[in-house]
Amino acid sequence: MPGRCQHEETAICSSEETINEFEALTRDAGRVQQDTLRKILEANADAEYLARFGLDGRTDAESYKSCVPLCVHADVEPFIQRVADGDTSPLITGKPITALSLSSGTTQGKPKFLPFNDELIKNTLQVFRTSYAFRNRDYQIVKGRSLQFFYCSKQASTDGGIIATTATTNLHRSARYREGIKHIQSQGCSPDEVIVGPDFHQALYCHLLCGLIYSDEVRFVSSTFAHSLVQAFQTMEEVWKELCADIRDGVLSERVTVPSIREAVSRILKPNPHLADSIYNKCVGLSNWYGVIPALWPKTKYVYGIMTGSMEPYLKKLRHYAGHLPLISADYGASEGYVGCNIDPTVPPEQVTYAVLPNTGYFEFIPLQKPTGEETGNDTSIHYIESEPVGLTEVEVGEIYEVVLTTFAGLYRYRLGDVVNIAGFHNSTPKLQFICRRSLVLSIHVDKNTEKDLQIVVEEAAKLLEGEKLGIVDFTSCVDTSSDPGRYVIYWELSSGASDEVLRSCANALDLGFVDEGYKSSRKIVTIAPLELRILRKGTFKEILAHFLSLGGSVSQFKTPRFVNLSNIRVLQILNKNVTQSYFSTAYRL
Ligand code: AMP
């Protein structure tokens, strides 16, 4: 393999070594992909899932593609279920799978089980090490700490005794990961007991507290997804006086009751009236919390977390908290495996791309084209015209594709369901721009709208709120087909109350904002009824988050569902019981 970092097992590589390794791998991406496929197929040749397809020891891409079909989660589920039930025979991988990850499954309301193994840890460390090396080139961090808002979820054990938890928790549970990450980036502020603690509210409070205790040492602020960063500083607005009191007296607030968290945080909390006064005065001096991050953590160089896709709506608020600091989007991956890393940290999140590391899996891309004429079909997957999958180095700039993964953890030609645009190449590996998840669409019949379409429409309509100095806290949508014709329903939680007049005009703007021809023509002939805007009580999205956590999810992985499937009854119930006002569009009047 070209240019491998000599110390990959321990992840102790200099930034320069790491960048050299990346350059070598990506210069030869086509060959590295062939090698990677061979390794995956050799290691797993005996796995029952693969053996059925008659590869008979062949490991070349042509044989692989002609023998093994594309698959979706439902195709692998029976095998994963057997793993969960304790079957240790080679089912999807040569070596038995000993842990499972729960993917978020926010749309359907049902988390999915996915295989997790050491190879995924190794890939994750390689991706993190690579993007950190590139970050360090532009924003050099020599020593210091990072303020990290990371949370683990509860660990369940399946009937067969297999650990099942979120991918982030699986990573944090692993000594190999904890050791590796220590050598990649600055040490966090919070003790491990906070990260793995069972209560998210207490963990969040302690992350803030530990961050303040080490405020002079913090060099960057991060979380997995931007949502957790916004949530953290919104909480800061509510609890800052209590945090100051804790630091002044050196006594931890009684709100922290979990013994392991209390003990670990109390060990680092010492009375410090000087620091408490300084934090207090800085908070009082802020205007509406603008720039709180650089004010309280003055040596911070940037704010880091996934900011693309369903996280884009949080950017405005995050920029407010970050003041002049750059926002850098973190890498692109899924519980299934990592896809790409951000090697251009100075690019704003809206334009960020992800370079694929060709040795972390075998990647294929299904070319997608939006239909030009009227297409029918009422599946929940956006209806693109698909062509035969192409390899990593065969994709074309400017074209869109669905990502297909073959991983070291037992997924073969697995459709990830994400749509990406090819923004360019770095050497011979493509740089992907995340567009949306394929399944998240508002669709009643011929109309098809993606998560991205919805986001654009909501952002445009929300401009009408600016005159009233209001903002959207969060939003989601569903289709209401309980009456005929069905309609789109958009839910908004607002920062405070708005007038009926403004909200009525927002409902019209939303309805007119969908530019998809299928929607517009259906609205004109009323085969789709007027759009409804439902306003939610404050705190509704916190309730949805709590529900997600109750299913075993972790805050670090949470993505607000931008579209709620009718099968996701519990989330629909939460939304509908919290509706305070409702406005029907009067646009498209005949
Ligand atoms: P999960 O299944 O909970 O592991 O979530 C994985 C999904 O999160 C991916 O399939 C993407 O849809 C989304 N995701 C992960 N990383 C990014 C990113 N950098 N930008 C946009 N979406 C992302």
Image (tube, rainbow, N blue to C red):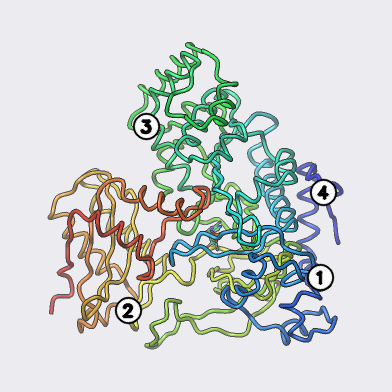
Q: Which residue is mark 1?
A: 31
Q: How far separated are the C-alphas under marks 3 and 4?
A: 42 Å
Evaluate whether residue 428 shows in this view.
Answer: no
Q: Is residue 230 above or below residue 286?
A: below
Considering every residue shown, the one lying at the far front of the view is: 159
Which quadrant of the figure shows ligand 1? bottom right
Q: What amino acid type is highlighted by mark number 3?
A: Glu
Q: How far separated are the C-alphas under marks 3 and 2?
A: 41 Å
| Disc nearest the viewer among 1 and 2 | 2
In the rendered view, does 336 fall on the left or right side of 281?
Answer: right
Q: What amino acid type is highlighted by mark number 1?
A: Arg
Residue 9: mark: 4
Depth check, front residue: 555 or 96: 96
Q: What residue do we see at 53% from left, 79% from top?
A: 368
Is tag 3's residue or tag 1's residue first in the polypeptide sequence? 1
Mark 3 and mark 2 residues within 8 Å of each other at the beta carbon = no
> Does the residue tagged 1 have its C-beta within 8 Å of any atom of ligand 1?
no
Q: What residue do we see at 67% from left, 67% from top?
A: 83
Image coords of residue 260 (percent x, y): 57, 31
Binning the other alpha carbons within 10 Å of mark 4 as few (below 14), some (14 to 19) or many (20 upward) gives few
Q: What residue do we see at 58% from left, 76% from top?
A: 72
Depth check, front residue: 563 or 176: 176
Image coords of residue 410 (percent x, y): 71, 69
> Does the residue tagged 2 have its C-beta within 8 Å of any atom of ligand 1?
no
Q: What amino acid type is highlighted by mark number 4?
A: Glu
| Disc nearest the viewer among 4 and 1 | 4
Q: Which residue is mark 3?
A: 237
